[in-house]
Each structure stands twice: as C-alpha cells, then as structure tokens.
Image: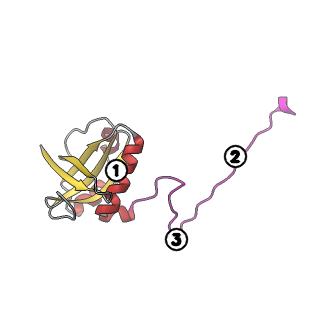
Amino acid sequence: MQEAVFKGASGKLYRFTALRPDGAFPAGPAVYAFARPGSGAGYGCRNWTPLFLSRTANLSVRMAGHERWDEARRMGATHVMILAFNERAEREAAEHDLVEALRPVMNDTAPARSEDAPVAPGQVVHFFPPIRLRTAAAS
C-alpha cells in the first residue's frame, strides 16, 4: 500500500493512503485528495502532487461518480489519497490546514459548499425569509 505524508500550514504532518480510483473505498468519514505522481511542495510530497483536496462524511458514497474526478484525471491524477477522521471538526481543520499549505490547483475552482462560504464576484445569491402560512384554525 502506497502512502504519502503532507505537511499542513500549521506544520502538522498528515499521513495519507493512496488508492486507485477504480478500487473500493471505505464507507466512512475522511479527508481525500486527487493526486498525480510527481514533485510537490512540502514534506513528503515529492512523490505526489495533490490536485484537489476535500472532505466527506462518507468516502464510499462521495467517490461514486465524483463530479471532479474526470477533470483531475485529465490533469494527470492517478490515485485518490485518503485520511480517515471520525470527527467533523477534525476533518474541517485538516482540510483547511492542507489546502492553505498545498494550494491544490483545482481547489481554486471548487464551488462553494455552504451559504457561509465567500460569494464569487458576479454570483447572485438570494436569501429569503421563511414564509409562515396561516391556517383556518389559527384565524
């Protein structure tokens, strides 16, 4: 089994396992990266260059037809790097730490995942207040 160690912006080291994209993925929470062989920045990255990095609550479900894999493959990705984390806060912290340090090229174009994420210039976002319906009994 191949492994890679990536260093986050905090200096923390993260040990990932490399899996082929056509293999079975564990059904659990993880931080994952699409990576290509080659040289990268940081400790332990000389054998892998992460192109896209994210997190998920269920890796098996997320990797079934991932919408960014074809793009990563065209850029040379051959493996999916995974690192299991049970706690959501740990996954979020690791993702942020690693993206800040490694700056995967595809993360610059990743769509925002929540309404708290920054809105790109020119992107229209509408937030509507909840509608309260009156019932005949309440009149």
Give x and y (percent) for residue 111. 43, 59
Residue in the picture at 39% in, 60% down = 110
Amino acid under disc 1: Ala
Q: What's the mark number on residue 130?
A: 2
Kindly state the secondary structure of the residue where label 1 is placed: helix
Which is more foreground, mark 1 or mark 3? 1
> Which residues are drawn in magenta?
110-139
Q: What's under tag 2, amino acid-wise?
A: Pro
Q: In the rendered structure, does residue 134 fall within the stretch colored magenta?
A: yes
Which residue was labeled with disc 1?
Answer: 94
Measuring from the top left, give residue 75's x and y in whole percent. 23, 64
Position of residue 125 in the picture relative to residue 103 (left or right): right
Q: Earlier in the sequence, mark 1 or mark 2?
A: 1
Give percent across and percent down for residue 33. 27, 53
Residue 34: quadrant of the picture = bottom left
According to the picture, the residue beneath numbered tag 3 turns out to be 121
- SS under mark 3: loop
Task: Tell me, yes or no, whether the two marked residues, 2 and 3, touch with CB atoms within 8 Å.
Answer: no
**Main secondary structure of the magenta stretch:** loop
